Amino acid sequence: MLKTIRTLLGKTNNITRSAYIWNAVNAIVSALQNPVILIVMTRTNGEYDAGVFSISFAIAGLMLFIGLYGLRRFQSSDINEKYTFGDYHGMRCISCGAMLIASAVYCIYGSFFLEYNAEKVTVVLLICVVRCIQAYADVFHGRMQQVGRLDVATKASTARYVAEIVVYCIVLIITRDLVMSTIAFAIASFVIFMLTTANAAKDFCTYRPTFDRFQIKMLIVEGFPLFASLFLNMYISNAPKYAIDAILTEQIQAKYNMIFMPAFVVMLIANFIFNPILTTYAEMWLAGTKEQLKNLLKHIRRQMAIILGLSILGLAVAATIGIPVLAFIFGVDLHPYKSELIVVMVGGGALAYATFFSTVITIMRLQKYLLVCYGVCALAAKVLSEPFVSNNGMMGAAELYAIIMIILAVLLFIITAVKLGKEWKKYND
């Protein structure tokens, strides 16, 4: 059976086309995971459990970046293999261990200082475990992408996402038990990981990690700006949710996540258009020729135009049919929150730009500047989140999100433009 699964994952008539298609499917399924479960959760268990689920996903999403340590894009664009897969694997084992420890510490903190009950602590911890499985799988996916088989990685990832969604929803509908459903969610994630990613990895790498002290140290040093910036990026994105968790109710948390979904989808769709050509971008940059730099600039302008188009489309939908559609889907009255949805959509478009520029900056190996930008925005989010949410409720959360995302996108754009301008000038002096 395992051999048959490997054959199915690797089967394709056109690797490039398959990579594009499956990357798109994977991005869509990934984007749908939270909203689909949230829809079922709201209709079966009510807004309170939906709020618990929402903040659990937000916390686990933050912890995920500890497990990833920001190295996926670095690994995928390491076309000269400065580090071996064993080095990346060893580093990922360490970062995933750190992720689990951090998750446990947060749960203890939540229990003592945020009045989390036993059920909420359990759900948070279990979803963090699921995200740890995702982080560990990602190092194998990075290897597959590095050798030109992103299609295999995205097929495996899609299978895991689908299994997680189906199992969570079925168990939830049958039991209406939040903890039991989350346990099934974690089991499904692990089983599908073993059948797909771990199984397929046999054709691309050895399973044994290496723990060379020097190489691990260098990966920690080189990856830290990426890790810190992406971790702070997730914190910035979710700062309104954390403020709502501390100040407002689980019901408000659920409604904020409902209106946040369209903005998140815009960002994911923009990213999946870019992800399949990540290695190509790296090759253009490393080529060191005027012609390839010109091609890179052309691709960057095209991606910026795509993000703008998606953002405008998202805003148009939000301003017209957004609230009625969301209210119908979730079965919750969201009509008082039309303005909040529009503001959040502006922030979602800015986040898409910020994520894109941060990727280009990573390819150019200017990670230290990412840390400065994300650090400034994270500090601003930390200072502003409580007063914004305390004074203006959900609108305050939406405004905070949009303002911080716009600032971040502008800062990252300036760094990208300055660096590319300097490179272009070298060929025209």
Image: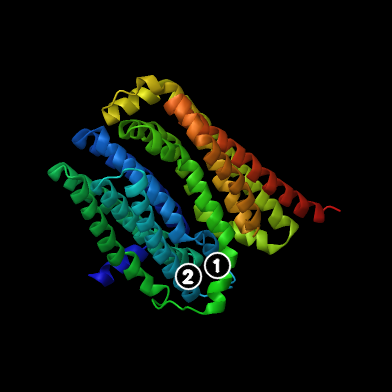
For residue 427, side relative to residue 414 (left or right): right
Secondary structure at numbered mark 2:
helix
Across and down, in percent, residue 188 comes to 24, 57
Foreground of the two, 287 or 419: 419
Residue occupying image coordinates x 59% and y 66%: 221
Kind of residue at badge 2: Met
Can residue 251 be seen in the rendering of this structure?
yes
- The kind of residue tagged 1 is Ile
Q: Residues within 10 Å of mark 1 (few under 14, many from 20)?
A: some
- Mark 2 sits on what residue? 91
- Name the image quarter holding residue 336: top left
Depth check: give the residue in front, 12 or 208. 208
Which disc is residue 166 wearing?
A: none
Q: Tell me if label 2 and label 1 are in contact, CB under 8 Å.
A: yes
Report whether residue 395 is seen. Answer: no
Picture residue at 31% right of the left edge, 26% below the top = 327
Taking the spot 45% from the left edge, 71% from the top edge, the residue there is 89
Distance, label 2 to label 1, CA atoms, is: 8 Å
Residue nearest the observer in this picture, 258 or 110: 110
> Does 46 sit left or right of 391 as displayed?
left
Disc 1: which residue: 220
Q: Position of residue 236 (x, y in %)?
A: 51, 43
Where is residue 278 shown, x and y percent of the image?
A: 55, 56
- Please determine whether, in this image, residue 405 is positioned above or below residue 95: above
Quadrant the N terminus occupies: bottom left
Here the colouring is rainbow
Q: Decide which of 311, 231 is in the foreground and name it.
A: 231
Task: Give the mark nearest the N terminus, 2 or 1.
Answer: 2
- How crowded is the residue under tag 2: few (<14 C-alpha within 10 Å), some, or many (20+)? many
Q: Which x, y percent locates residue 67?
A: 43, 61
Q: Residue furthest front?
A: 112
Is 327 placed left or right of 370 in the picture? left
